Image: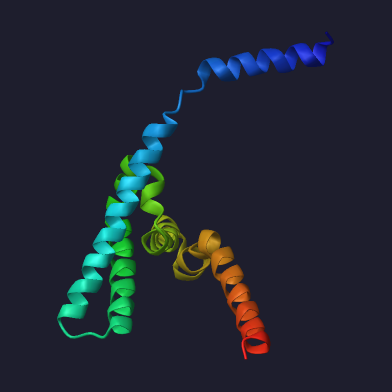
Amino acid sequence: MNTSQKSKDRFQRMVKEVSPNSAVVKNCVKAFFSGGLICCFGQFLTDVFGKIGASKDDAGMYTTAALIFLGVLLTGLGVYDKIGKHTGAGSVVPITGFANSMAAPAVEFKKEGMIMGIGAKMFLVAGPVIVYGLITSVAVGVLYYIFGR
């Protein structure tokens, strides 16, 4: 065995010794139930908006706006990160997770100013999502226009 291989083996043993064991099944169950709870809350909001007279489409839009607002508010108050520590991937449910990914860098970099801090940094994580989402939606729209007739 050469020196390089011995070093790699020694490194792998060291990594195994210091790496914590992850509870994959436990984390998946927590993520499933916490994400489901957030989705149930969203459905509750949709039902409430529907009961107060909103159409089905309008209730969906109001729910989306409310979930985005709550995600940003909880991020600004420092609560969303605490929720994420306990729920794991379940807190990354698309609407609230996206709101958190936009607001968290803005809160973190506010000391760098409005333009270079908040304005520039808040799109670090969400920017690619917006760009590729927009490109994909345009491509699907064009294909639907061409072949959907």
Residue 93: percent from left, percent from top: 39, 57
User: Residue at image x 47%, y 60%?
Assistant: 112
Quarter occupied by residue 55? bottom left
Measured along the vertical axis of the image, is residue 147 above or below residue 26? Answer: below
x, y percentage for residue 64? 34, 72
Q: Residue furthest left?
A: 52
Image coordinates for residue 32, horizontal then vertical, percent: 36, 46
Question: Which residue is located at x 26 percent, y 66 percent?
Answer: 43
Q: Position of residue 37 (x, y in %)?
A: 27, 53
Q: Residue furthest top?
A: 1
Location of residue 94 (image quadrant): bottom left
Which colour style is shown? rainbow
* Location of residue 62 with respect to 103 vertically, above or below: below
Quadrant (top left, top right, bottom left, bottom right) of the N terminus: top right
Residue 87 versus residue 103 in the image, above or below? above
Residue 78 seen in render: no
